[in-house]
Amino acid sequence: MQPSDTFVGSIDQGTTSTRFLIFNHEGDPVASHQVEFSQIYPNPGWHEHDPLEIVTSVETCIEEAVQNFEAQGHTRSSIQSIGITNQRETTIVWDHETGEPLYNAIVWTDTRSQAIVAELKQKPGAAQLQTLCGLPLSTYSSATKLLWMLSHVPRVKDAFDRGTLAFGTVDAWLVYRLNGGVAANVFVSDSTNASRTITIRRSWTFLGSGGKVHLPRIVPSSDATAYGVVASGPLAQVPIMGCLGDQSAALVGQKGFSPGMAKNTYGTGCFLLYNVGDKPVFSTHGLLATVAYHFGGRPIYALEGSIAVAGSGIKFLQNNLNFFQESKEVNDLAYSVQDNGGCVFVTAFSGLFAPYWIDDAKGTIFGITQYTQKGHIARATLEATCFQTKAILDAMEKDSGHTLSELAVDGGMSNSDLAMQTQADLISIPVYRPKMRETTALGAAIAAGLAVGLWHNFAELRDINRSGGVVFEPQIPRQESAAKFGQWEKAVQMSRGWVGSKSTEQKEVVGPKNGTYALAKNPDLPPPKVVQIPDTPLVSDMVKSSTYIAAVKERAYVSVKEIEATYPPVRTGLGSVLCDLDDADEEDLFMELRKVEILQRLRKLRKRQSNSY
Ligand SMILES: Nc1ncnc2c1ncn2[C@@H]1O[C@H](COP(=O)(O)OP(=O)(O)O)[C@@H](O)[C@H]1O
Ligand SMILES: O=P(O)(O)OC[C@H](O)CO
């Protein structure tokens, strides 16, 4: 067969939609189909997908795209192999013996594991975890979602106890199901996806889970045999040969193969990946170390800046606030005003990710007045992702010592000219948007195409998607962008600390019993552990104690021992004061602590004054 008669398929399983695209040897998509699927939000901060619906959406896309392909006169047998790319971190568990899912997929944006994260952060060695696995302890990684399931979902716990619990990210689940499930039992994950889980070796041991969970075998991103073959449907018997997490796939699709190359993908979230070569770089400025791709030999690593909300902010304006009917309309709305009218929208729906990692932030709009119109909020929504990208680029510069000369972009939100111009203005370097924006799907196609021999090396890929792109040049002076960014940074600081405040969570403080407090969170969390109210440390030490403050905020249930370990106890009789606090909640508790502290200072002052008379 001539290269011109051969094709490669690409499944792009994103957070809000699934696509299947068929690429030719020139890297052009010749047929495609896309479907959106259900977003399940059962509680504030929770986000789920139905694992079976994900599989069905893939099957539907394959069927429709192949039909379209054949209608153009091609034959399905000319599709040589398939690549998969997927939303990362999203956590799926199934029964290893039956192949059935045991719970909805917990999506990467979901923050329900916050209390688990806060507890883990107290463990000795927590600060070193990032140097083992590249990721910070946060609700983002798969592992904390899995730990939540283990402690909250009886079916998952039962399977764990029986030794039949299988865990995978979306790639592993799709490969498993496309191969026919339990019969073939192809249970693998590629290195890029695996690098997002914290379930690897020592980091998994740190999290304290036994070896009873079946974890997928980690294999290269491009491999002729490891991923098996499709068991049924129009592409039955076609081998799966490529697999990459979507952000890695976009880097490959943008052909970011040399150290120093970067791309920023504006999808549901927004992710900047910067190729650092074959040795991981561990960030000291809030970025992640991740596997960029692994095409045999040594894996190639990237520094990553992850932004949780990009296109999902636009979807929020569309679906929750009814600002418009379709995402693309955000642009006209934003163009209806000159500027953001003083509004800054910190779109921290899942807390704030890189480079800030603020777990206790929530979405907050600053600067609203009677003057504010929908257009200002639309602009502020687009700007939020651009500001975070600027913060990430600054962090990346500090970590790598390298300044980017141009930013390559893609993803749904990159279709917005206004957003891309704003981006160029804020980072003061040109933004390059390729003509064909399905770079994520292209990356998975490249991984599969290299394995099947459609392409043989990176040099052959050079001309793919090279012409017809648009460059957005910065149009405002650096001082102006610095002033705007300063306002954003101020808003970020002001968005801190919302989670855990009275009005956002159902909570109850079980009154003092024998000198102890039990702090209960919402009913979805496990029964509260008892917090011993220390009757020994100095009040000021307690108020200062970040361990204690963080613990109370997160309801992480620290024990007095941990506080005492940090702050040597001095007897003050505080315990008895606290034990008198009937029905107090945490804020009252802090107020009382403050009052006692002030009272003590006053007394000391008075004593000193009276001594001096
Ligand atoms: N023309 C547009 N202008 C701005 N945002 C857009 C536009 N088209 C799509 N989007 C946004 O892009 C996101 C989808 O991008 P996509 O790359 O498909 O994401 P994912 O892979 O995460 O599903 C949606 O959240 C949508 O709001
Ligand atoms: O759905 P996207 O394209 O925003 O990507 C999701 C990421 O993989 C999450 O880490």
Image (cartoon, rainbow, N blue to C red):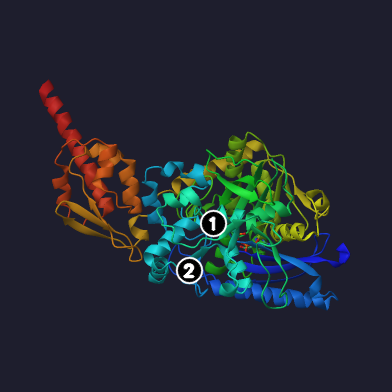
Indicate the quadrant where residue 597 lies: top left
- The residue type indicated by label 2 comes to Tyr
Asked whether residue 390 is in view, the answer is yes
| 26 sits to left or right of 561 | right
Secondary structure under tag 1 reads loop
x, y percent for residue 573: 14, 41
Label 1 environment density (alpha carbons within 10 Å; few <14, some 14–19, many ≥20): some
User: Residue visible at 54% across and 71% down?
Assistant: 51
Q: Name the quarter where the N terminus is drawn.
A: bottom right
Indicate the quadrant of ligand 2 in the picture.
Answer: bottom right
Query: On the picture, is 47 further left or further right than 480?
Result: left
Q: 518 or 595, which lies in front?
A: 518
Residue 608, horizontal then vertical, whole percent: 15, 25
The residue beneath circle 1 is 372
Total marks placed: 2
Question: Looking at this view, is 88 or 203 the one in front?
Answer: 203
Q: Residue at x 50, y 44 (%)?
A: 132
Asked whether disc 1 touches disc 2, contact meaning CB atoms under 8 Å apart, the reply is no
For mark 2, what is the residue? 41
Residue 43 position within the rendered picture, expressed as x and y whole percent measured from the top left = 43, 67
Q: Residue furthest top?
A: 612
Seen in the picture, residue 497 relative to 1 is either above or below; the reply is above
- Badge 2: residue crowd in 10 Å (few <14, some 14–19, many ≥20): few
What percent of the width, then of the height, locates residue 254? Answer: 73, 52
Above or below: residue 377 compared with residue 206: below
| Amino acid at circle 1 | Thr
Left or right, residue 123 beside residue 290: left
User: Which image quadrant is residue 504 in?
Assistant: bottom left
In this view of the protein, which residue sits in the foreground, 205 or 264?
205
Instruction: Label 2, secondary structure: give it.
Output: loop
